[in-house]
Image (cartoon, grey):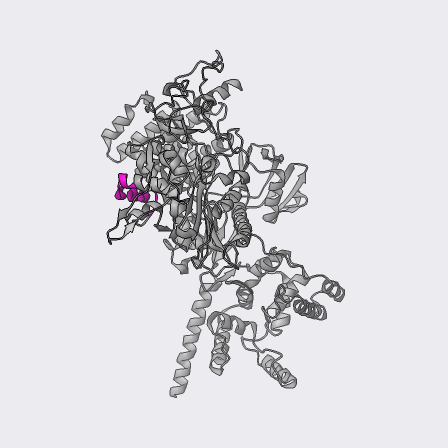
């Protein structure tokens, strides 16, 4: 059953995870260096007229790059989850991803993985929510958004919600 | 003839009762409950000293790890650990040697002893108790193989010398006791065998009647007829009552050992075993904490008997008798309020009888460090607050719950300032008006409507409402002031009542009520105007559920104390998977969270900063019910959410606002949890902008000293502060994103 499920794109997901693993780590995110009593985490204010302009080496990007990846600890857990899932041990895979999510609760890649597991066990509704959560967390990371979008579309189709699935697939980050 | 028949029926009945009950108990081990195992990985914020504390709490000893599991060696900040064989939810792990390096802040690297990769490694899950369903009985079951020989022989020597010979009733013993009692003129010896004592504990009341004695004798004999001596002895050792800790009855030598000496039974020496054995005769009479001298005399009498009977040699008996009692405070893992929550979670799926059955293992989310921190924070702060309280001789109470919002894992539950409370668990059972904790639901409803942003001005002005019963309701601000036109963000941060009531009425009570329910309130709130100021009553646990959704970007995760239940063979019976629902749009929740981040910097919770690590970003809301009967704070960091309630059990006025009572407890709890800053992902449709906190006009921090960051839908037209001509256009305000991006380029 596991092998024949059409939405099981785990090798692909793992590929993404491993590929991204070499990137610099935004996880866990550092706490912004601000002083007590001052405003926390202020957005860097664009230069007022009197302030020096942004350094020329840093042209303003339309959308700052943002890439999520797995740490060695969570990557090893994801690999283990895949192994368990291949054996048909859905509960084991699920608990193992639980462990990973406790280490990196805001990593969209882990929610994507959990979405896959939920689809595999036939819980399309939970798969949908996991994918939506992954999408929310992946804001600004097009690769992760596209992967989350695929899980979301699969989860919607599995519930017979084809028009919604098509709408998701037509979104910009899917291409 | 008739009498003989009745007697026969009676005996058969007792025989059936005794076998049925004993069968059930003897071969069933109550569910063992485990706390969450500590995850180790490079980068985990666990210092070398933390790690050693953890190992010691799990009874790992320093020594040569090559000699067996349960032993570690520490060389500087390097650990060579021989981890025990241990069962987790998802795997049985064999004993293995690992090497772990840590520094003064975190784990730096880990390897298997053979040099193999070890990206992540769990320590043993700590046992926190067992779910014995009857009365407040608590115990840790000891297996036959784990009974120390000196305990086995010693208990027989002191309580029932002819245990191995008699068949349940010791006629010789009864005669001897009677003779001794007659000579003394009062009762000095009991003639009951261990079997009779066991039967009495199992089935019978304490009354000393002939009928009860006869029943006890018959049952004891039937028990002996069916079961081996060793089974009866072990059952006795696990059953016997050894002391009282508030509402909790200490049963069995396994728990007795933990309760009096804070170590496992196998590690007790002769003097410690003698103390426990001596306690059987009168757990309150010889209570070593209340009557140390009496307990010492009793212990030494038992030691002398040990020596006389050659269980230990006489010289050793003398040496042991000179040693102190050696009591240690019970380990910090007695967690009645948390176990309460576990029981409730399990009751949905299991009958009480099943929990006492075949060796279930219950794996929970409890984090013992968080639990201890929360308990300490509550106890210490309430002690200080009692002194300041206007109520003379008052005894403030409180409750704290800590969760990981993303998984719904409940990591700590504190149900009162002292551990041994009456069993009333305020965290779960105390339903109180939540005061201003309700306001975020009003403001979220406003943001979701699309008609308001955090910068929208609303009117804080007096209002009078005619209620359905004809009375007039005229709410006031806490400080009895009126603020006029204020932006939404300030009205929430400063918890303005008049502005909130006006906003809520504009949105409609049913909409606000529906928001509360979406966020996680399980019962529908009564839709009267005063609900906008928090007359709705909730328990701390219910508040946690609602705020979890706010801390997690609008995703509502079911709270979870129990992660999984395994059967005696380690097979999963049930796992409680993460259950998430999309409850509120992430974009609106982000805008609300940005406002809640202003509460500790500009609003009612400014007092928190002094107690938190410098620079830590947190979000939250204070709550005070009418006449300061309830003091609340609900708030979150990047990794934990906590809700604190402070008040009197009899609902008197405390004189404390949420900021004065609950907030210090909250901040101290969070500060001890290695918090990381709350740093929500900015949704695609939203951007961060600067506005003046007082006037809501778009500005920048170099122009206005009261500039604060809010989140607004992208390209929202915000009125510009005319004095700040250089105020940025929306498109030039990429906010956090650009900062992050710059940081990456610079590094």
Q: Position of residue A132 (x, y in %)?
A: 34, 32
- Left or right: B626 in relation to B382: left
Q: Decide which of B199, B687 is in the foreground and name it.
A: B687
Q: Position of residue A139 (x, y in %)?
A: 38, 27
Q: Position of residue B364 (x, y in %)?
A: 46, 48
- Residue B513 occupies which quadrant of the picture? top left
**Is residue B505 found inside the magenta-colored segment of the image?**
yes
Prevailing secondary structure of the magenta residues? helix
Count of marks, rendered view: 0
Whether B296 is drawn above or below B740: the answer is: below
Q: Position of residue B714 (x, y in %)?
A: 34, 24
Q: Decide which of B602, B287 is in the foreground and name it.
A: B602
Whether B479 is drawn above or below B159: the answer is: above
The quarter in which the C terminus of chain B is drawn is top right
- Left or right: B502 in relation to B427: left
Whether B483 is drawn above or below B205: the answer is: above
The quarter in which the N terminus of chain B is drawn is bottom left
Give the magenta part as a residue range. Answer: B503-521
- Residue B619 occupies which quadrant of the picture? top left
| Residue B559 visible within the image | no
- Left or right: B662 in relation to B237: left
Say which residue appears at 53% left-offset and 44% top-offset. B668
Q: Decide which of B29, B685 is in the foreground and name it.
A: B685
- Residue B152 occupies which quadrant of the picture? bottom right
**Is residue B190 found inside the magenta-colored segment of the image?**
no
Furthest residue to the right? B315
């Amino acid at each position: 059953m596991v092998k024949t499920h059409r939405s099981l794109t785990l090798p692909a997901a793992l590929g993404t995870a491993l590929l991204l693993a070499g990137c610099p780590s935004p996880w866990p995110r550092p706490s912004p260096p601000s002083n007590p009593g001052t405003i926390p985490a202020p957005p860097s204010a664009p230069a007022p007229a009197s302030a020096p302009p942004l350094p020329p080496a840093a042209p303003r990007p339309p959308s700052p790059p943002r890439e999520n990846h797995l740490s060695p600890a969570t990557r090893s857990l994801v690999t283990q989850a895949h192994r368990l899932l291949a054996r048909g041990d859905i509960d084991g895979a699920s608990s193992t991803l639980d462990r990973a999510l406790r280490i990196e609760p805001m990593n969209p890649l882990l929610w994507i993985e959990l979405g896959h597991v939920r689809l595999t066990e036939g819980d399309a509704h939970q798969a949908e929510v996991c994918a939506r959560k992954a999408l929310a967390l992946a804001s600004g990371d097009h690769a992760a958004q596209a992967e989350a979008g695929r899980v979301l579309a699969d989860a919607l189709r599995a519930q017979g919600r084809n028009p919604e699935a098509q709408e998701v697939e037509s979104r910009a980050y899917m291409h | 003839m008739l009498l003989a028949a009745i007697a026969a029926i009676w005996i058969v009945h007792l025989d059936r009762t005794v076998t049925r009950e004993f069968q059930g108990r003897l071969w069933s081990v109550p569910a063992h409950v485990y706390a969450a195992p500590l995850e180790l990985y490079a980068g985990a914020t666990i210092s070398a000293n933390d790690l050693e504390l953890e190992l010691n709490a799990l009874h790992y000893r320093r020594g040569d790890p090559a000699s067996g599991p349960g032993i570690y060696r520490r060389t500087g900040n390097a650990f060579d650990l021989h981890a025990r064989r241990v069962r987790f939810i998802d795997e049985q792990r064999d004993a293995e040697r690992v090497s772990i390096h840590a520094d003064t802040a975190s784990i730096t690297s880990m390897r298997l002893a053979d040099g193999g990769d070890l990206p992540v490694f769990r320590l043993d899950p700590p046992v926190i108790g067992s779910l014995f369903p009857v009365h407040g009985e608590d115990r840790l079951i000891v297996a036959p193989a784990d009974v120390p020989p000196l305990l086995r022989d010693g208990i027989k020597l002191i309580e029932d010398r002819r245990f191995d010979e008699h068949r349940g009733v010791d006629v010789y013993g009864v005669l001897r006791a009677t003779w001794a009692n007659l000579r003394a003129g009062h009762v000095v010896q009991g003639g009951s065998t261990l079997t009779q004592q066991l039967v009495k504990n199992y089935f019978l009341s304490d009354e000393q009647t002939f009928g009860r004695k006869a029943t006890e004798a018959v049952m004891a004999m039937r028990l002996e007829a069916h079961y081996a001596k060793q089974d009866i002895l072990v059952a006795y050792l696990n059953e016997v009552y050894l002391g009282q800790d508030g509402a909790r009855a200490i049963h069995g030598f396994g728990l007795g050992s933990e309760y009096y000496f804070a170590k496992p039974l196998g590690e007790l020496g002769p003097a410690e075993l003698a103390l426990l054995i001596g306690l059987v005769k009168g757990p309150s009479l010889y209570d070593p904490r209340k009557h140390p001298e009496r307990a010492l005399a009793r212990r030494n009498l038992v030691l002398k008997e040990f020596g006389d009977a050659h269980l230990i040699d006489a010289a050793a008996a003398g040496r042991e008798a000179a040693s102190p009692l050696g009591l240690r405070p019970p380990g910090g893992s007695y967690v009645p309020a948390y176990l309460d929550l576990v029981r409730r979670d399990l009751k949905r799926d299991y009958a009480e009888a099943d929990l006492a059955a075949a060796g279930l293992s219950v794996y929970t989310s409890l984090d013992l460090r968080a639990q201890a921190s929360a308990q300490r924070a509550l106890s210490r702060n309430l002690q200080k607050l009692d002194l300041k309280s206007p109520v003379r001789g008052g005894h403030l109470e409180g409750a704290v719950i800590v969760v990981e919002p993303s998984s719904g894992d409940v990591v700590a539950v504190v149900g009162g300032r002292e551990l041994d409370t009456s069993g009333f668990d305020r965290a779960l059972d105390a339903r109180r008006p939540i005061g201003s904790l309700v306001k975020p639901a009003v403001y979220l409803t406003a943001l979701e409507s699309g008609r308001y942003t955090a910068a929208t001005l609303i009117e804080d002005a007096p209002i009078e409402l005619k209620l359905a019963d004809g009375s007039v309701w005229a709410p006031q601000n806490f400080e009895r002031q009126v603020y006029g036109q204020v932006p939404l963000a300030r009205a929430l941060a400063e918890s303005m009542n008049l502005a909130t009531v006006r906003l809520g009425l504009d949105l409609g009570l049913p909409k606000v009520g529906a928001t509360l329910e979406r966020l996680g309130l399980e019962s529908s709130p009564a839709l009267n105007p005063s609900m906008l100021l928090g007359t709705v009553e909730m328990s701390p646990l219910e508040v946690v559920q609602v705020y979890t959704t706010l801390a997690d970007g609008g995703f509502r995760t079911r709270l979870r104390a129990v992660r999984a239940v395994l059967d005696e063979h380690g097979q999963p019976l049930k796992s409680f998977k993460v259950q998430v629902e999309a409850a509120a749009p992430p974009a609106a929740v982000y805008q609300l969270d940005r406002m809640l981040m202003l509460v500790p910097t500009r609003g009612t919770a400014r007092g928190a900063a002094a107690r938190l690590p410098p620079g830590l970003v947190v979000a939250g809301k204070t709550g005070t019910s009418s006449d300061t009967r309830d003091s609340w704070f609900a708030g979150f960091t990047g990794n934990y959410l906590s809700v604190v309630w402070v008040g009197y059990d009899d609902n008197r006025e405390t004189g404390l606002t949420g900021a004065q009572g609950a907030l210090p407890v909250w901040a101290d709890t969070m500060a001890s949890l290695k918090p990381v800053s709350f740093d929500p992902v900015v949704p695609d449709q939203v951007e961060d902008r600067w506005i003046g906190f007082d006037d809501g006009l778009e500005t920048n921090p170099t122009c206005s000293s009261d500039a604060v960051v809010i989140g607004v839908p992208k390209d929202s037209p915000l009125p510009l502060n005319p004095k700040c001509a250089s105020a940025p256009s929306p498109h030039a305000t990429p906010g956090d994103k650009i900062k992050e991006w710059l940081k990456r380029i610079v590094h």
